[in-house]
Image (cartoon, grey):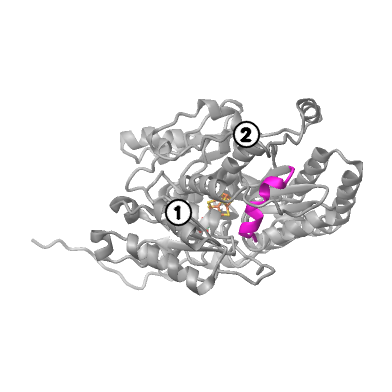
Amino acid sequence: ADIFRDTIMEKYPPKVLKKRKKQFIVREADPEQSIQANVRTVPGIITQRGCCYAGCKGVVLGPTRDIINITHGPIGCGFYSWLTRRNQTRPGDNGENYMTYCFSTDMQDQNIVFGGEKLLRQAVQEAYDIFHPKAIAIFSTCPVGLIGDDVHVIAREMKEQFGDCNVFAFSCEGYKGVSQSAGHHIANNQIFKHVVGTSEEGRTGRYKINLLGEYNIGGDAFVIEELLEKCGITLVSTYSGNSSIDQFASSHTADLNCIMCHRSINYVAGMMETKYGIPWIKVNFIGAEATAKSLRKIAAYFEEPELEKRVEEVIAEEIVGVEAVLEEIRPRTEGKTTMLFVGGSRAHHYQELFKELGMEVLAAGYEFGHRDDYEGRRVLPSIKVDADSRNIEELKVEQDTERYRPRKDESSREELEQQGLSFSSYEGLMPEMENGSFVVDDISHYEMERLILEYRPDVFCAGIKEKFCVQKMGVPMKQLHSYDYGGPYAGFAGAINWYREIDRMVGSKVWGLIGAPWEKNRTLHGRFVATT
Ligand code: CFM
Ligand code: HCA
């Protein structure tokens, strides 16, 4: 593996080679092994990354149904981010759902020259007049930051003027930061500042949790909602799959935060703990085993035998179906191989599902994960803050004088830790990976092609930009962002869907038949003759 890696790296100029080597590593037994991440992509390399605006507007805020999201900028950004992420929702009680709309200020050249503030005010007013929504959010695209429109002042003034509509803005210009990841942080900050804690009317129940970092792609959140309900656990809010602004507003009334996607949402969890005293734990509902483990963690936290009993009953009930399907499928998938390159958490979470199928992960990596997503949160103090991350505001959060209420005192927290429930912790992707496998940050198309040619995995997992390149190489490709047209894959029901899907994909004969006809049988022959 080391030699092969060097042959890939060999093609790079020395400076690029030096940088890529730190981001393209062969997994070793060393628990301290480190990787470089969350740094700028080398210009000219074909990356899969997206921009800060995508992370803020598309990812974190996109799935919330009843906030009108206005893209302030030229029409392309708004249009491109319109319904591309398969984040599903149910219309709320009042039927409000703006997700099917695309709101944009449609900035033109003259607005770039003379300023776009007037245009933005008009758009916010128009949205308010037509829809009377509970909230309007403004998202800045690249030119807004360059020309200096003050979106925050406009938001504040219009909020005051309306009186019954929360208006807030995001300085999430595409270029801010090295990837989508910057946009997650900015989204977390503004939701925390302008929405969390603005309503005390949350859902009531004995076991109240928030689910953070679950975006309901392909209906995943629906499956988890159902499962939690079956266990008698009350979901106060989800950030942000199938969510509404009222859920965020009252999310500080929950007693536990459960983090699915650590990368995109850990900031809100940290801030809620400081301000309101809500602890957080890492969960993962991708994989049947992982789902059972996550439910047990939640039950352990509440320390109520009644809940623990109910959770065990639900697991026992659900696992029967899972095991029956695995028994049928696993003989066909056992020993097959895969590679996963996705965002900032799925390249880790989906390894659970492959393990259940007896498949081997040859290579994995994130587009924009940070070192803590690879190596675990223990490395946080050693992460260097560079110019790109310094760019993004760190909110100074303090205990709420009235509403701070530690949900667990020190001694019961310690006791739970001793029993194996760890708080505020995430181990990352790397411990999951076998020695000799590859961990690659911000993989390029060139590196991806070399890996595929050398190892020919039985299925390759990534996004739309890789999809057709991979399929043309005769390798089945599963999109782990949109799930292609499939899903849900979360929870027990989702795991069953996944097993069936992967079984079909690795068993299909069609991929062996796609050699181009001219590769076998050349019909045209030619000779290049130089002319003077
Ligand atoms: Fe979290 Fe996500 Fe992901 Fe992500 Fe994304 Fe996504 Fe993703 Mo695409 S929030 S980091 S920014 S799990 S949109 S739902 S699939 S890259 S791995
Ligand atoms: C984004 C969204 C994306 C893109 C997916 C892909 C998603 O990063 O802006 O490249 O296939 O999940 O929809 O990650």
User: Which residue is disc 1 drawn over?
Assistant: 156
Q: Is residue 238 visible?
A: yes
Q: Is residue 365 left or right of residue 174?
A: right
Q: Is residue 14 left or right of residue 433?
A: left
What type is the residue that disc 2 sits on? Gln
Where's residue 156, x and y in %? 45, 53
- 257, 122: nearer the viewer: 122
Dot 1 alpha-carbon crowd within 10 angstroms: few under 14, some 14 to 19, many 20 or more: some
User: Which residue is disc 2 drawn over?
Assistant: 399
Q: Quadrant of residue 240?
A: bottom right
Q: Residue at x 61, y 28 (%)?
A: 29
Where's residue 174, x and y in %? 39, 52
Give the answer, above or below, for where 377 lies relative to 257. above
Q: Is residue 477 visible?
A: no
- For label 2, the SS is loop
Upstream in sequence: badge 2 or badge 1: 1
Where's residue 392, x and y in %? 44, 40
Is 473 part of what is drawn in magenta? no
Which of the labelled discs sits on residue 99, or is there none? none
Which region is colored magenta? 242-255
Q: Quadrant of the C terminus?
A: bottom left
- For label 1, the SS is helix
Q: Residue at x 74, y 53 (%)?
A: 235
What type is the residue that disc 1 sits on? Arg
Q: Nearer the viewer, mark 2 or mark 1?
A: 1
Q: Residue at x 64, y 35 (%)?
A: 401
- 433, 147: nearer the viewer: 147
Q: Is residue 11 left or right of residue 186?
A: left
Q: Residue at x 55, y 69 (%)?
A: 98
